[in-house]
Amino acid sequence: MSPEKLQKNFERCADWEERYMYLIELGDRLEPFPVTKMNKTHLIAGCQSNVWLDLSISQQNKMSIQATSDSSLVKGLLALVLIAYNNQKPESILQFDIKGWFRQLDLKSQLSPSRSQGLEAIIKHILCHARAV
């Protein structure tokens, strides 16, 4: 799914309760995360819930991201991040205005400060990895 398609789907939701349900549904669709990678190496600091990320670069120079959380809502937020970043070249990831996209989705106004900080930590981790490639 593209960021544009997700935005259209989000706009179809009648209210924020529907949007939360949609986020949880997106999180449920995440690719299963390997249990063997649910460790300190893949755990993201700065998140209220446990969040694990596994980042790699393919032979086509595209970043592959696997992610999960022990929170249904956070898994939905991870799904949004993956829609924006997964299987993209590092340059594209660095150029994509994810904060602007989140503003268009009116996401920040609906998240608690701790959830927003956790989301920032996830994005920062991915951007640092994209810069290092």
Image (cartoon, rainbow, N blue to C red):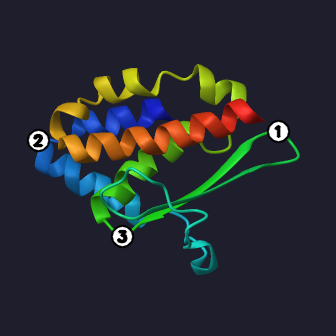
N-terminal-most mark, 2 or 1: 2
Q: What residue occupies the far right of the structure in this picture?
A: 59
Disc marking residue 61: 1
Q: Nearer the viewer, residue 8 or 119?
A: 119
Residue 1 appearing in the image: no
Find residue 10 and report its image quarter.
top left
Identity of the residue drawn at 44% across and 51% down: 79
Identify the residue at horizontal 55%, vertical 65% (top origin).
Answer: 31
Residue position for label 3: 70
Say which label, 3 or 1, has the lower sequence index.
1
Q: Name which residue lies at 12% across and 41% down.
A: 14
Q: Amino acid at mark 2?
A: Asp
Q: Is residue 121 left or right of residue 53?
A: left
Looking at the rendered image, the quarter that the C terminus falls into is top right
Check disc 3 and give the amino acid type: Asp
Camera-near label (2 vs 3) is 3
Residue 15 bears which disc, if any? 2
Badge 1: how crowded within 10 Å, few (<14), some, or many (20+)? Answer: some
